[in-house]
Amino acid sequence: MHEIDRRQLTGGLAALSLGVLLRPGSLRAAARSRVAIIGGGPGGATVAVTLKRAAPDIDVTLIEPQRQYTTCFYSNHFIGGFLPFSRITHTYAGLVSLGINVIYERATAIDAEKREVRIEHGANVPYDRLVVAPGIALKYGSIEGYSEAASYFMPHAWSGGRQSRLLRERLDDMPNGGLVVIAAPRNPYRCPPGPYERACLIANYLKREKPKSKLIILDPKMAFSKQAVFEEAFAKYYKGIVELRLTNDIDDMSVVRVDPKTGEVVTKSGETFKTAVANIIPDQTAGKIALDAGLAEGGWCPILPETFRSAKMENVYVVGDATVAADMPKSAFSANSQARAVAGHILADLTGAERPAAAYRNTCWSMLAPDDSVKIGADYAPGDLKGKHALVPKDPFISKTGESAALRKETYEESLAWYQTLTDDIFAKRASATGRVAPSGRG
Ligand SMILES: Cc1cc2nc3c(=O)[nH]c(=O)nc-3n(C[C@H](O)[C@H](O)[C@H](O)COP(=O)(O)OP(=O)(O)OC[C@H]3O[C@@H](n4cnc5c(N)ncnc54)[C@H](O)[C@@H]3O)c2cc1C
C-alpha cells in the first residue's frame, strides 16, 4: 500500500520533481522559440506556467475561449451545496502576469506543415512546439432526444461552469418527492468515480432539503471505480434514497432515449423513468479540435508514453483528458502530472535542458458525506501492458470499506488541501518558491 501523506501534498506540488531542478528563468532558448497551447485547463495551463517560469525567453501563447475557468473537479461539491461557485472558479490573471500571451479565442484548425494554429477570428498563431489540451467532447448523438439544446433541461454538468449551475438550479426547483436520475457514461470517460461521488452529494442534498425524493443511477457498465466504498456509502448514508442500477447479463441499463419536455428517460432494457431532474452524462471523445486536426484514433489521441508527444503529428504534444493514456484515469491530477512532463520535454527540445524521466502519478479523491472522503491512485511508467507498450500502473492504492471516521476525515482534509495547491499551481496564483521545474507528478 502506497500512501501520500498530507505534508507531501500541501508541501508542494512544486516539489514534485523528477530531478530537473532549475532556478526560475535559468534556461535560454537558442532563438526566440514559440510555444502555442490549445486549452487552458489543468493540462494546458500547467504547461504554460511551468515553461514560462523556467524559461521566460520562450514566447508562450495560450489559446482558450473562456475568460474564467470553472473546475469540473469539485463541481460535485458545489452541486451538493458544500462549496460556493466562486471557490471553483479561476481566472488567467496569474498567467498574464507571468508574461504568457493569453488569447481568449477558440482554435479552429492546426496547419502542421506551416506550424500554425488558426484561431476563431482568422488570425494564425505560429509555433515551434504545440501543446493540444482541449479536454473532452460529449457524444450527444449517442442518446436519442439528447442534444446540446436538450442539455439545458437535462444538464450533463460534465464540462463545468454553466452546466454545473444548471444542474444545481434543476435540483433547487424540483419538488420534494421527485425522482433524480443520473445516467452514467461508458468507459473511457472523464473522472471515472465522478458520477458516483455526484450521487452521494446530490443524495446528501436531498436528505437535507427534499427527504421524500429518490435518486437512481442508470449505468451501462457492470462495475465502476471505487465501487465497494461507494456501495458502502449508499447503504450507510443514503439508504432508501439512492438506488444503483448496474447493467447485468439480463438488463442493459444504458440510457437510449430521453424526452426533455416530459422528463422521461428510457433504458435499453425498456424501462421508462419519469424524472424531476435528469443528469444525462453521455459518452465522450477527445475535444473537437483534436478530432478535426487528425490527432485522434477511435475518438482519443494516441501519445508516446515516454513524452506525451502525439503519435500522429510532428512537433505536437497532447496532454490531459484528450489522450489515450492507457489505464491512467482522465483526471485533473493526471493532466497536471502529464503537463509537467511535457513542459520538461519542450524545455529539452528548445533549450537543451535535461529530459525528465517518464513517470507520472494520479490520485482521485471522492467525497461521500461531510468529513468522509476516499481515494484511489497509482504511479505510472512506460512498460508492457497486456502485450502493448503503454503506461503501466505501479504501487496502486485504494481506500477500503470499514475505515475509521478519523481516517476518512483526514482523507477529506487532504483532498481539500490538494485542490488548493493544484489550482494555485495551474493558475499561477503564487510565485514559485523553489524554482523547481516539476515535469512529472511523482512525490
Ligand atoms: C464531476 C467531475 C468531478 C471531477 N473530479 C475530479 C477530481 O476530484 N479530481 C481530479 O483530478 N479530476 C476530477 N475531474 C476530472 C477533471 O476535471 C478533468 O480530468 C480535467 O479537467 C482535465 O483537464 P484538461 O486540461 O485535459 O481538460 P479541461 O479541463 O476540459 O480543459 C480544456 C480546456 O480547453 C479549452 N478548449 C477546448 N477546445 C478548445 C479549442 N478549440 N480552442 C481553445 N481552447 C479549447 C476548454 O475551454 C477548456 O478550458 C472531475 C470531472 C468531473 C466532470
Image: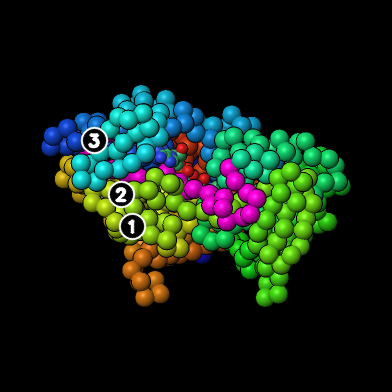
- Front residue of 120/318: it is 120
Q: Residues within 10 Å of mark 1 (few under 14, many from 20)?
A: many
Say which residue appears at 69% left-offset and 52% top-offset: 258
Say which residue appears at 23% left-offset and 51% top-offset: 314
Question: Real-space Cα distance between discs 2 and 3?
Answer: 15 Å
Q: Residues within 10 Å of mark 2 (few under 14, many from 20)?
A: many
Nearest to N terminus: mark 1 or mark 3: 3
- Front residue of 164/273: it is 273
Classify residue 153 by image quadrant.
top right
Q: Which residue is labeled 2 in the image? A: 317
- Front residue of 86/409: it is 86
Disc number at residue 427? Answer: none
Q: Where does the magenta region start and end?
A: 125-148
Task: Tell whether 241 sits left or right of 142.
Answer: right
Q: Residue 131 colored magenta?
A: yes
Question: Disc 3 beta carbon < 8 A from ligand 1?
Answer: no
Under circle 2, the secondary element is: strand
Q: Position of residue 178 (x, y in %)?
A: 82, 46
Q: Position of residue 343 (x, y in %)?
A: 30, 44
Classify residue 175 by image quadrant.
top right
Say which residue appears at 29% left-offset and 58% top-offset: 311
Disc number at residue 126? Answer: 3
Q: Residues within 10 Å of mark 3 (few under 14, many from 20)?
A: some
Residue 183 visible within the image? yes
Question: Real-space Cα distance between discs 1 and 2?
Answer: 8 Å
Marks 1 and 2 in Cβ contact (< 8 Å): yes
Q: Which residue is labeled 1 in the image? A: 303
Question: Real-space Cα distance between discs 1 and 3?
Answer: 22 Å
Task: Tell whether 321 sits left or right of 54.
Answer: right
- Total labels: the figure holds 3
